[in-house]
Image: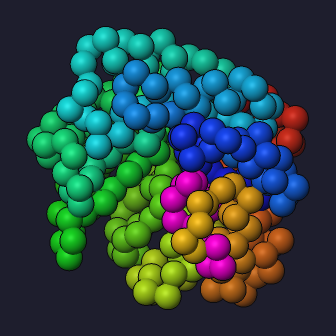
Amino acid sequence: MFVDSHAHLDGTQFDVDREAVIARARGAGVQALVAIGNGDGPAQVDCGIQLAEKYDFIYATLGIHPHEARLADEAAYQNMERLAKHPKVIAWGEIGLDYYYDHSPRDMQKEVFIRQMELAAAVKLPIVIHCRPSEGCEDAWDDCLGLLQERWAPSGLGGVLHCFTGTWPQAKRAVDMGFMISFAGNVTFPKAQQIRDAALEVPLDRMLIETDSPYLAPVPHRGKRNEPAFVVETARKLGELRNLAVEEMGHLTSGNFHQFFKLTETAESKIPAR
């Protein structure tokens, strides 16, 4: 019983075998997964919804990724306001800041991040956060957590720090604001000790697991295209760290997912409670 809380299944990497990938996930014990609705920019934020409409056990998000912040306009915001009312949309994201690639100017990233927090609060959706600092710096973490404290924490809606790569003190700041901390396949990488150190401290009831497919395939699949079935390896590594069997970690994080998003914990559940 596993949940992949963050997967990009809309990409061209899955065009040739998307249905087989989803079938393998089910065969591996993945009872639910979240299709992230970023696409390649504002024109494709419904990509997760399209998958969620096809499969009962898939839920969706929508949002403008910081990479594409430069493409945001009023028409995009209005479209997302409309789509956010879809019954399979359970969160707004991934949104946030990326100072590693700087595909969009940082001031613009902040502006788009703030606007999307306002929109998410209006429809009472939690948010999924992407935060990547520039190499060797904490700049994006400082800005992201600061904006969350100022602009989001008062909403009480919380969210998910996806693919967490920071430190325990950074995770704790988010936990104190009602966030879940989601770990991806990079927790298995040999040089990812900082992530494992944080995973030792995050309360068990605030943990989620994800693949971030098609990126960050875990050991022993590193170097391959990632896919939701591989979320089991992330659960296995976290279980090793916390002295839990892989099945226990899967059950625990699955329960966390369903409780946080107020979903019925069955593969047949379709409509989240509002």
Question: Percent position (x, y) of residue 13?
Answer: 57, 47
Question: Percent position (x, y) of residue 146?
Answer: 23, 53
Q: Is residue 124 visible?
A: no
Quadrant where the image shows the C terminus: top right
Question: Percent position (x, y) of residue 96?
Answer: 32, 46
202 or 26: nearer the viewer: 26
The answer to whether residue 137 is left or right of residue 272 is left
The answer to whether residue 247 is left or right of residue 98 is right
65 or 217: nearer the viewer: 217
> In the rendered view, would you say 141 is above or below 37?
below
Q: How are the colours assigned in the image?
A: rainbow
The quadrant holding residue 252 is: bottom right
> In the rendered view, would you say 200 is above or below 2?
below
At a point 48% along the width and 55% down the height, the residue shown is 162
Number of numbered discs visible in the structure rendering: 0
Question: Percent position (x, y) of residue 107?
Answer: 11, 41
> In the rendered view, would you say 142 is above or below 90?
below
Region of the chain picked out in magenta, as a range: 207-221
At a point 15% along the width and 36% down the height, the residue shown is 108
Q: Is residue 75 visible?
A: yes
* Magenta stretch: dominant secondary structure: loop
At a point 26% along the width and 14% down the height, the residue shown is 74
At a point 80% along the width and 31% down the height, the residue shown is 56
The residue at the far front in this view is 16
Quadrant where the image shows the N terminus: bottom right
The answer to whether residue 75 is left or right of residue 11 is left
> In the rendered view, would you say 231 is above or below 241?
above
Q: Is residue 272 magenta?
A: no
